[in-house]
Amino acid sequence: MAEVKIQAESRTEFGKGAARRIRRDNKVPAVLYGHGSDPVHITLPGHDTMLALKTANALLMIEVEGGESHLALPKQVQRDPLKGFIEHVDLVIVRRGEKVQVDIAVHLEGEAVSDALVVLEAPSILVEAEATHIPDGVTVSIEGLEIGAQIHASDLKLPTGTTLAIEPDTLVVNVTAQPTAEQVDAEMAEAEAEAGVQRDEPTAAEEPVAAAAE
């Protein structure tokens, strides 16, 4: 994975008000930490950060103005729940050759037999890889799989240098039969019946209060 260089500025203002001012300038408040060093509070350029973080596990070279450069991985990205813009980024410092644990996406290719329902039980898996050689994901072929087939983590073909960091028997893909129309109708009816029962049950506020003894 190629490194993405991002110019950063040191940050000395904190709190919600300071964060709002930073975002109004199309920048992102962030913090760098790891390897026993004190947290480094920085400000990142909004557009460049947004583009870089479109790639999962993006490897970033953070060049702090007037300070040191740090190789880092995004640990936590906070986004506005409505507008989706980046509100804050936690970055963990890594070193070349160091092993890190990250989640990578599972991609399916091919088609199972007709009338089969393919369920991706694990859209991502935890792996261990070198910080500078994190795979973009792992591809799983479901071509021709029969109903009842299962693919576990131990069945995945990971890139050289990447190992599983989860239990080998973790279920990743499960192939079942497509539900019939009758089964779908029955499940919907059952769900509606359960919802009706729940609505009819009185809440604590609705329960009748016993009359006081005369």
Image (tube, grey):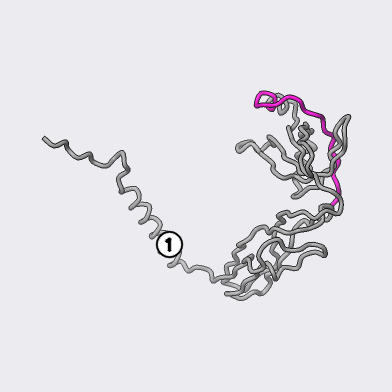
Q: Nearer the viewer, residue 125 or 120?
A: 125
Q: Nearer the viewer, residue 39 or 46?
A: 39
Identify residue type, mark 1: Glu
Horizontal side of 89 relative to 214 (left or right) equals right
What residue is shown at x 78% (from left), y 62% (from top)? 162
Q: Quadrant of residue 64?
A: top right
What residue is shown at x 56% (from left), y 70% (from top)? 176
76 lies above or below 44: below
| Percent of width and height locating residue 198 | 35, 50
Horizontal side of 210 relative to 24 (left or right) equals left
Q: Quadrant of residue 148?
A: bottom right
In the image, residue 2 lies in the stretch drawn in magenta:
yes
113 lies above or below 133: below
What residue is shown at x 38% (from left), y 60% (from top)? 190
| Percent of width and height locating residue 29 | 73, 32
| Percent of width and height locating residue 163 | 76, 63
For the C terminus, the quadrant is: top left
116 lies above or below 166: below
Horizontal side of 103 relative to 96 (left or right) equals left
Q: Which residue is mark 1?
A: 187
| Percent of width and height locating residue 78 | 66, 39
The residue range painted magenta reads: 1-19
